[in-house]
Image: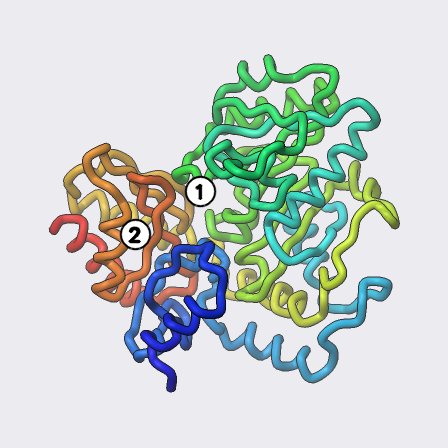
């Protein structure tokens, strides 16, 4: 088997270096564990920026669905339909707010579809979108226009009309609305921005404002769903329903699936010719997504997320970790906020050296996202590594 060093060298030779990759090549995964090309084992509390999924690596039920579908049909073009994408769309809408689904491959693509839907629904002359400081909606030009300027540098000018205000400040949102405003994009938890949580009052206030001003409310659930926060979709924690929801990452069980979900009111805005994605909803990826949704239900992973999340919080609180200011998040999606003197990246690198994969959300925020299927013993082992590093 080719080793880490050789694969890293070949990566540097053949792949564009836009990721700042670590010097590790992953070779195999099972459940909450990954193995690199040198055979070293890691507990995965990183989840590949969330795309590693809530069901763990290579879950047998998802692998079986992929293998079965691969023997029958991989792609056919989107002038036709297929049973797996219908199954996945049904499972999403029945657990959300009804409506219909457009499939693509990624969160950025799902947000691009939502952007077009909002503009079409708003009508001529209304094109402005309100988003929030510390948000992240993607790196395509439309989604990037909704994302903070630190990500936009070198790519200006952006799509016109975006207005960015402070997350949680309902008065600032109301003040930003004018006759040209079409909609609002909001994350129910800001993942890349530091695992920031809103209040229920803020989210419900956005719903009321959109109803009053005839705006389209879009929830970006690319990181938070399905099931990671202990609900099928994180907006369900706050007692409201968005008009549109975007999904990706974990929804595919490890394969690339993106989805733009429109409520019944907006389900027929994207008519033929307005938008498309050649491979969106292809049978293989859709089969993996449907199997993921079924697995969450069959194994009661919503309750599992609540249980594991409570255990993680308790272990961290009991450890009395120096410089830890706050634990943020829901279910099994956490950010550990440290004071300004302690940076998260050295913690991440030390954890990796000791066989635990975690990630950073901001300079002083460490991110934890283990799979919901993790065994209790694996959870304890991973938390032992983390706590020892944090207290070291």
Q: Could you tell which of marks 1 and 2 lies nearer the N-terminus?
A: 1
Residue at position x 42%, y 66% in the image: 12
The percent position of residue 295, horizontal first and vertical second, equals 55, 66
Residue 354 position (above or below residue 184): below
- Of the numbered discs in the image, which one, if any, rests on residue 192? 1
Instruction: Determine the secondary structure under disc 2.
Output: helix
Give the residue number, with chain letter if any, for mark 2. 311
* Residue 237 in view (yes/no): no
- Among the 4 quarters of the image, the one containing residue 253: bottom right
The answer to whether 180 is drawn above or below residue 63 in the figure is above
Q: Which residue is drawn at 50% across and 36% down?
A: 153
Instruction: Tell me where residue 93 appears, x and y as whole percent.
Output: 69, 50
Q: Is residue 388 rendered to the left or right of residue 305?
A: left
Above or below for 382 versus 35: above
**In the picture provided, is 252 more to the left or to the right than 270?**
left
Badge 2: residue crowd in 10 Å (few <14, some 14–19, many ≥20): some
Residue at the spot 80% in from the left edge and 22% down from the top edge: 125
Query: Which element type, helix, strand or loop, lies under badge 1?
Result: loop
Looking at this view, is 238 or 350 the one in front?
A: 350
Give the quarter of the figure containing the N terminus. bottom left
Task: Determine the residue positioned at 35% across, 74% down.
Answer: 35
Observer able to see residue 18: yes
Residue 76 drawn at (x, y percent): 80, 71
**Rendering quarter of residue 269:** top right
Mark 1 vs mark 2: in front: 1
The colour scheme of the drawn protein is rainbow
Quarter of the image for residue 56 reads bottom left
């Amino acid at each position: 088997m080719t080793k880490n060093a050789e694969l890293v060298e070949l990566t540097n030779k053949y792949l564009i270096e836009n990721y700042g990759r670590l010097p590790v090549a992953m070779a195999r995964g099972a459940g909450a564990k990954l193995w690199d090309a040198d055979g070293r084992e890691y507990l995965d509390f990183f989840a590949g920026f969330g795309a590693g999924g809530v069901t763990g690596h290579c879950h047998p039920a998802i692998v079986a669905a992929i293998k079965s579908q691969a023997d029958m049909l991989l792609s056919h073009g989107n002038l036709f339909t297929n049973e797996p994408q219908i199954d996945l769309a049904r499972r999403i809408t029945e657990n959300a707010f009804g409506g219909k689904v457009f499939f693509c491959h990624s969160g950025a693509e799902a947000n691009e579809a939502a952007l077009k839907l909002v503009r079409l629904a708003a009508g001529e002359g209304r094109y402005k979108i309100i988003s929030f400081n510390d948000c992240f909606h993607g790196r395509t030009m439309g989604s990037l226009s909704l994302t903070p300027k630190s990500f936009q540098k070198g790519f200006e000018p952006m799509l016109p009309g975006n207005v960015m205000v402070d997350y949680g400040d309902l008065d600032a949102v109301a003040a930003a609305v004018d006759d040209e405003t079409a909609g609002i994009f909001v994350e129910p938890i800001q993942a890349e921005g530091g695992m920031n949580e809103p209040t229920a009052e803020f989210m419900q206030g956005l719903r009321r404002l959109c109803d009053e001003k005839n705006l389209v409310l879009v929830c970006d659930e690319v990181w938070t769903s399905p099931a990671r926060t202990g609900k099928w979709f994180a907006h369900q924690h706050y007692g409201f329903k968005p008009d549109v929801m975007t999904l990706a990452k974990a929804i595919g069980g490890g394969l690339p699936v993106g989805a733009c979900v429109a409520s019944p009111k907006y389900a027929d805005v994207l008519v033929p010719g307005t938008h498309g994605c050649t491979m969106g909803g292809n049978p293989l990826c859709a089969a993996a997504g449907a199997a993921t949704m079924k697995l969450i239900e069959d194994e009661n992973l919503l309750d599992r997320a609540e249980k594991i999340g409570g255990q993680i919080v308790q272990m961290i609180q009991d450890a009395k970790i120096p410089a830890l200011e706050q634990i943020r998040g829901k279910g099994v999606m956490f950010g550990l906020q440290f004071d300004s003197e302690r940076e998260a990246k050295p913690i991440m690198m030390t954890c990796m050296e000791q066989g635990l994969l975690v990630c950073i959300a901001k300079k002083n925020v460490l991110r934890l996202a283990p799979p919901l299927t993790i065994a209790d013993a694996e959870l304890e082992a991973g938390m032992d590594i983390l706590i020892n590093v944090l207290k070291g």
